[in-house]
Image (cartoon, grey):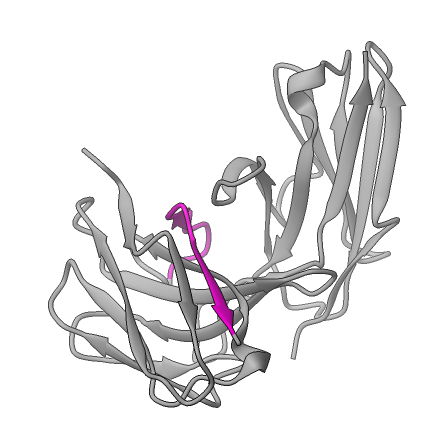
Amino acid sequence: GENVEQHPSTLSVQEGDSAVIKCTYSDSASNYFPWYKQELGKGPQLIIDIRSNVGEKKDQRIAVTLNKTAKHFSLHITETQPEDSAVYFCAAKAPPGANSKLTFGKGITLSVRP
Amino acid sequence: NAGVTQTPKFQVLKTGQSMTLQCAQDMNHNSMYWYRQDPGMGLRLIYYSASEGTTDKGEVPNGYNVSRLNKREFSLRLESAAPSQTSVYFCASSSHGTSVSDTQYFGPGTRLTVL
C-alpha cells in the first residue's frame, strides 16, 4: 500500500520567514495530494490540495508543488505568522478503486517564533 | 450547520470496559471515517463507510467495531478496552469517498484514556 513520509518532524522559523515542508510518497498511482492543518485541541482542516495533472497551486500565502517523477510534494508558507503554528499533515490518495483511501504522513509541528 | 460532531470529548475507561464513540455529520455526505491519532504516528484509519449500509476495515481495525446507523451517524465501539487504545479518535466525512479530490472534514476529536 501507499506510504507517505514527512521530514523533519519539527520545524521552527522566525515570523516573516518562509517555511517549506516536504513529503514523499511511494505509490506512483497516487494522484491527489491534500495538506491538512491541525491546531491544538482541534481536528485537522484542509488548507490546500493538488492533483497530479498540476505541478503547482497557490492560495494567498500558501502554495503546494508536486514532482511526480521524484514522488515528492511540498507545502510552502510565505511571510509566516504566529497563527501558522500548528501540526501539518500531508496525504496521498490513489485513483478511485477498492484501495483508494487517504494515507497520511506522521505530521510536522511548525513553530513560528514572534 | 455544525459539520462533524463527536461525543464525548473526553473519556476515561478501565481495562476491559466497553464504550461507544458517537459521530454525526449534517453535510449530507456519503462517506464517513474513523481515525486514531497517536504521538509520532500521524492519523491511522480504523474503519470507514463508503456509503450508507457499508463498512470496511482500515489500517488498524483490531479491537474495534463500527455501525453506520444511517446516512448521518457512524459509531465506533470498543468492546473490551485496552491501554493500547489510549488515543485521540477523530471522525471524518466526505461527499464521495471514491472520487479523486474528495475533501474529508474532521470532527473535534475524542480523547480516550484506558487505565
Residue B7 at x, y percent in the picture: 28, 55
Residue B95 can be seen, yes or no: no
In the depicted structure, whether residue A98 falls above or below residue A36: below
Q: What residue sits 44% from the left and 68% below the top?
A: A96
Q: What residue sits 82% from the left and 9% below the top?
A: A16
Q: What residue sits 82% from the left and 12% below the top?
A: A15
Q: Quadrant of residue B60?
A: bottom right
A61 left or right, relative to B94: right
Residue A55 at x, y percent in the picture: 71, 38
In the depicted structure, whether residue A83 falls above or below residue B90: above
Residue A78 magenta: no
Q: Quadrant of residue B19?
A: bottom left
- The stretch in magenta equals B99-114
Residue B46 at x, y percent in the picture: 46, 75
B34 left or right, relative to B37: left
Q: Nearer the viewer, residue A52 or A64?
A: A64
